[in-house]
């Protein structure tokens, strides 16, 4: 089928881009010539072995069924959302904070040096984090000299989500009609919806998680001629999954449960299987883990992270993370009381909750936003509420065991496009493997909770959601529920609610936000809510280039810019336009000799960084002999307000 071909092609694009990053770095050839040669050889290899790798297009009726499929309400609404996401991504530059603060800059550092290297910086995240989306974005940044196309790395996987969700759900025993409805509903979860047009890296590995399970399930089919081939793709997808984010490592458990018993299949093609295993190790988290061991003596890099990143008390981690997941996913999508909640929540919540959370999690664990944003949102209110209602509506069935029927599904799907899917074989998994495949994603989530103290867990577990879903959808009665009129109305309401979430998002508003809010503020000057809304949209509109005013104070022909800021400060403004200059980080404790040896004549310094390091600007200037030649203020985050920035000239 064309869909499976699209998934395989995306996996190979991911594999080649990641392998290119590491291999070209090893030879110091992370440049245009290196990429052209590597991708050229890769394309020739895939073309020559297209049959063995399942990359040939097999004729099917998918084109005709697709036209019928998108005439139905849920697929049509998903298609409309996908179009709006593309428009937003194309109109606006990336504003994702993690991308701007360290993911894109670390790639620009590597490209400037021609290889991966441990960057001299206060921002440890540039060094110890997984490199999945970085290696995918590196050729885009190199050849386009822009970050405007990075959103495609999230948009393309978003298009693959419905088909993979349907296939995995059916393999794991979910009824056809239920799987069909949720294949369109789950991708409208706010984390998937908002990051599909952004440069974030939390949701794009979801395709890898689903593909790892889907191909492993297909490898169980004894009538499938390409069982070994499916196992190869399952392994590559699992490697890419953990290569994208270390927080996905627990998801190797369900993959191992499904694919582990099939390991003997690899003996049928030992040479290619060995090569695939080597490639999988290369594109996984393993290279980053080895580099972390070398540079910071901890494979995970957690010894560099700030307080709260690693959970101290696993029991608190379990209930604390569950509290955060529920809080973030059930908060209304439009929550004007967010400011009040963030300020007062710690005063009225029981101390039995507040004290352990404060001792084990990052600060601001109670934070909520007025609107869902890609920085913190999970699947969100609509999907969470509908899923809860769907489970409770058949609560009387919960005392029964899960439905693990191996029989082919009855004709309960409806629609010619879905009936064509019923021709797929979903009955190959042994009952015990299927039960474990439903259970182990929840154990993986438990392992994540016991280890992580990050407060944005609702978005970090995005790849977990689709693998957690089948266990709930297998509950008896779900196929009856999705036929009820009230459920259909709620489902359409959930999808329709996704449209204002997408349209109003501050990073990529699809309405004249600043124009409308400016006029409303002029007519209602004392309205704090309107002023706050306008400030948020204004900051987001410049978030892709937050220190542009500071850059204008630098000499125009400057090739190297020093940057001295806090770990969360954004240096992306001084790389622009990409390829024109290089940014090198400076630490407060660096000596003038060390700074000059790196070719830095001018540097930009943030005032707040000096206070954090226990030194004043005047004291640092006196120690280094540097001179402030200009200063201005800039706002990076609304909560922080305007902050002072200085342009400093180092002594000759």
Image (cartoon, rainbow, N blue to C red):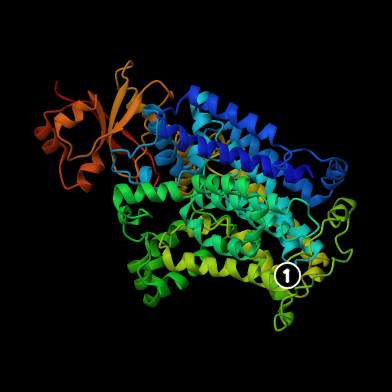
Instruction: Identify the residue under disc 1.
Output: 430
Judge left or right: residue 350 versus residue 14. Answer: left
Q: Is residue 352 above or below residue 412?
A: below
Q: Quadrant of the N terminus?
A: top right
Instruction: Tell me the residue at 28%/43% (across/down).
Output: 122
Q: Is residue 319 above or below residue 35?
A: below
Q: Quadrant of the C terminus?
A: top left
Can the viewer see residue 204?
no
Instruction: Tell me the residue at 55%/64% (across/down).
Output: 253
Residue 634 screen position, x and y as percent: 34, 35
Residue 214 screen position, x and y as percent: 69, 56
The one nearer the camera, 498 or 201, is: 201
Q: Is residue 451 above or below residue 522?
A: below
Instruction: Tell me the residue at 49%/23% (across/down).
Output: 32
Residue 611 screen position, x and y as percent: 20, 46
Can the viewer see residue 1?
yes
Specify few, some or many for label 1: CA neighbours under 10 Å numbering under 14, 14-19, or 20 or more: few
Q: Residue furthest bottom?
A: 399
Judge left or right: residue 544 versus residue 252. Answer: left
């Amino acid at each position: 089928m064309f869909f499976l071909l699209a998934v395989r092609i995306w996996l190979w694009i991911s594999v080649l881009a990641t392998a290119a990053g590491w291999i070209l770095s090893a030879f110091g050839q992370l440049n245009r010539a290196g990429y052209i040669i590597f991708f050229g050889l890769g394309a020739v290899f895939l073309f020559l072995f297209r049959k063995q790798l399942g990359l040939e297009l097999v004729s099917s009726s998918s084109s005709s069924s697709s036209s019928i499929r998108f005439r139905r309400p849920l697929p049509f609404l998903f298609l409309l959302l996908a179009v709006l996401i593309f428009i937003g991504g194309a109109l606006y530059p990336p504003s994702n904070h993690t991308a701007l603060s360290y993911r894109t800059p670390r790639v620009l550092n590597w490209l400037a040096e021609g290889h991966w290297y441990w960057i001299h910086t206060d921002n440890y995240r540039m060094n110890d984090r997984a490199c999945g989306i970085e290696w995918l974005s590196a050729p885009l940044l190199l050849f386009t000299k822009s970050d405007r196309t990075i959103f495609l790395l999230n948009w393309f996987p978003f298009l693959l989500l419905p088909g993979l969700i349907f296939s995995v759900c059916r393999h794991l025993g979910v009824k056809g009609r239920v799987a069909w409805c949720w294949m369109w509903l789950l991708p409208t979860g706010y984390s998937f919806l908002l990051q599909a047009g952004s440069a974030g890296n939390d949701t794009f590995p979801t395709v890898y998680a689903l593909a790892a399970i889907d191909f492993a399930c297909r490898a169980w089919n004894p009538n499938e001629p390409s069982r070994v081939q499916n196992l190869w793709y399952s392994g590559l997808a699992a490697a890419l999954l953990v290569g994208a984010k270390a927080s996905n490592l627990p998801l190797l458990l369900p993959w191992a449960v499904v694919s582990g018993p099939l390991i003997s299949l690899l003996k049928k093609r030992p040479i290619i299987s060995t090569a695939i295993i080597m490639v999988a190790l290369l594109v996984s988290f393993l290279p980053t883990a080895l580099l972390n061991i070398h540079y910071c003596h901890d494979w995970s890099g957690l010894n560099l992270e700030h307080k709260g990143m690693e959970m101290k008390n696993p029991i608190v981690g379990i209930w604390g993370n569950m509290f955060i997941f529920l809080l973030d996913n059930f908060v209304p999508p439009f929550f004007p009381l967010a400011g009040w909640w963030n300020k007062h929540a710690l005063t009225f919540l029981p101390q039995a909750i507040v004290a352990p959370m404060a001792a084990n999690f990052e600060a601001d664990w109670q934070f909520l936003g007025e609107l869902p944003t890609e920085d913190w949102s999970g699947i969100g209110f609509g999907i969470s509420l509908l899923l809860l209602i769907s489970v409770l509506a058949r609560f009387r069935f919960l005392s029964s065991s899960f439905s693990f029927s191996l029989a082919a599904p009855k004709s309960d799907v409806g629609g010619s496009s879905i009936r064509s899917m019923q021709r797929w074989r979903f009955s190959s998994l042994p009952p015990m493997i299927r039960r474990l495949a439903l259970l182990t994603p929840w154990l993986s989530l438990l392992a994540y909770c016991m280890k992580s103290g990050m407060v944005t867990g609702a978005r970090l577990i995005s790849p977990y959601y689709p693998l957690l879903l089948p266990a709930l959808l297998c509950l008896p009665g779900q196929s009856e529920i999705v036929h009820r009129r009230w459920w259909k109305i709620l489902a359409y309401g959930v999808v329709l609610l996704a449209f204002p979430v997408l349209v109003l998002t501050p990073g990529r508003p699809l309405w004249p936000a600043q124009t409308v809010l400016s006029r409303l503020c002029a007519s209602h000057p004392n309205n704090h809510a309107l002023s706050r809304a306008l400030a948020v949209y204004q900051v987001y509109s410049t978030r892709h280039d937050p220190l542009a005013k500071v850059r204008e104070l630098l000499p125009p022909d400057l090739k190297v810019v020093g940057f001295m800021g806090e770990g969360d400060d954004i240096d992306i403004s001084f790389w622009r336009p990409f390829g024109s200059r290089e940014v090198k980080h400076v630490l407060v404790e660096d000596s003038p000799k060390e700074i000059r040896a790196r070719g830095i004549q001018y540097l930009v310094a943030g005032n707040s960084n000096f206070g954090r390091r226990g030194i004043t600007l005047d004291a640092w200037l006196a120690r280094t002999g540097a001179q402030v030649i200009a200063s201005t203020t800039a706002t990076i985050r609304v909560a922080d307000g305007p902050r002072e920035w200085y342009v400093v000239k180092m002594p000759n």
